Image (cartoon, helix red, strand yellow):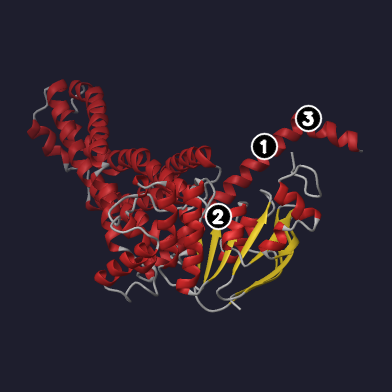
Amino acid sequence: MSIEVKNLVKKFGDKTVIDNVSFKVNDKETLAIVGFSGSGKSTILKLISGLIEKDGGEIITSKGDIAMVFQYSALFDSLNVEDNISFALRERRDLRKKFTPEQIRDIVAQKLELVGLKGIEEKFPSELSGGMQKRVSFARAIVTEPNTILYDEPTAGLDPISSTLIEDYIVRLKDEINAASIVVTHQMSTITRTADRVIMLYDGRIVFEGTAEELLRQETPYTKQFVTASLEGPMQMQA
Amino acid sequence: MGLLQKYYKQSATYKIFTGVYETLYDFLDTLGKITENGLAVAKCILKGQIDKKELIEQCSRFGVSSLPITLSIVAMTSVIIASQVALEMVKQGGGNFIGMMMTILIVRELAVIMAGFAIISMIGSSLASEIATMRVTEQIDAIRVLKVNPIANLFVPRVLSGMIMMPFVTIIAAVVGILAGAVTSDMFAGLSYMAYFDSAWLGVYMKDLWVSILKAVCFGGTIGLISCSCGYYASGGAKGVGLATTKAVVWSFVAIVIWDMVFALIFFF
């Protein structure tokens, strides 16, 4: 088991955005969390990564790092690619003295190669395309060899070919570093190409849990509405 | 009851009280956050969590970048004061004390407070907007997920650089201000440089210099801390960055004036 969430609750003011959610993600498994915008998907990632405090429940993680790939990459725009990727190795107290500058350069080159980007160490984020920025943020996330990687809408805003490339890297990284992955997405291609299991959130609760194939079979009103992108169904967007 | 409540909520009294409550809440909230961050910064410094490379970079930004504007402001203020009082003092027979008056004024107050104002508008605003932009673009979240302490990484070099560089900027500004006063007194009142500098040291003691340096350390640290804190809690995109920057500038201005008053009461009362 890499991560287990039990009866998780999060409130913003009076509104309960995560309401008693429980799930488990095993090592080398990819879980996709899907649902409408505002259903609480990204909030779950922020809770797991410790960016926000939970109001109830438990998050149990096995030893090791949790990495996160942000929706808009969140690269440090004043640092070049090499400094972005090596940031944790240079700045984290427990890692700072572990590596020499030469070792750090080698690790950065190795991670860049893993995401298919060689020789761009000196470039700044503003000089890269959206897809390249995303891949650099993958490299930055895996630099500490995490055992869980959280992806917040990794293919949002990318063209279909870049999306496919990113999806391939999600699968590849999972195999390369044996990490558990949680992918928050609305994109069907990302769900079908990357996920071993899928959970669907609506109004802070899990309304479907199964495989991508089961999701596509549209056997419940929720899955039917999601897959057909219909306005008719149990899930109503707030105006 | 519901109707009464509705009318009450639309009344001017309700709006005034709500406005006062929200302003007071925001004030105390900001003050609490700045204090909390200040303590966290002190803890990091005591633990030796200082990124030397980043510190040097921030020192250069704080000191070197702000120097031209600070020197210009202090020099011009000295010119304004000297041009207005020098001739009058010579007429009244007090020409020999112009140097003393200018030096007391510049060393005790003018250099440090004008340097503070210049640094707030130039460096404080840029620190706040930089960190606020990092906040709204999730860069600070990325720092936290990478398990790097954002206080040690962002705050410490900026606060410390303010504390280190502000005294140097103040000393250089004081020298330039005194020289500008001498040139102006010569030009407007025909006061010789000799007469100006003979009296320049009469009213200034070592205590004035040390208090001024101590003040500069406090001002520099306060500007860095407030600017970083206001940026750190920004939210809401471009508008949030703008609001954070404005807040940082206003709070820094008020804070250094309060500091100045505290120093005046403690050391010169």
Residue A198, image quadrant:
bottom right
- Vertical comparison of B189 with B199: above or below: above
Q: Which mark is residue B19?
A: 1
Numbered disc 1: what chain?
B
Contact between labelled residues 2 and 3, with CB atoms less than 8 Å apart: no
Q: CA distance from mark 2 to mark 1?
A: 20 Å
Q: Chain of mark 2?
A: B
What residue did someone put label 2 on? B32
Amino acid beneath label 2: Gly
B71 left or right, relative to A224: left
Taking the spot 57% from the left edge, 62% from the top edge, the residue there is: A194
Drawn side of residue B168 relative to residue B147, left or right: left
Kind of residue at disc 3: Ser
Residue at the spot 81% in from the left edge and 50% down from the top edge: A234
The disc at residue B11 is 3
Whole-Å distance between the Cαs marked 3 and 1? 12 Å
Quarter of the image with the N terminus of chain A in it:
bottom right
Query: Could you give the CA–CA distance between mark 3 and mark 2, rounded to whole angstroms?
Result: 31 Å
3 or 2: tag closer to the N-terminus: 3
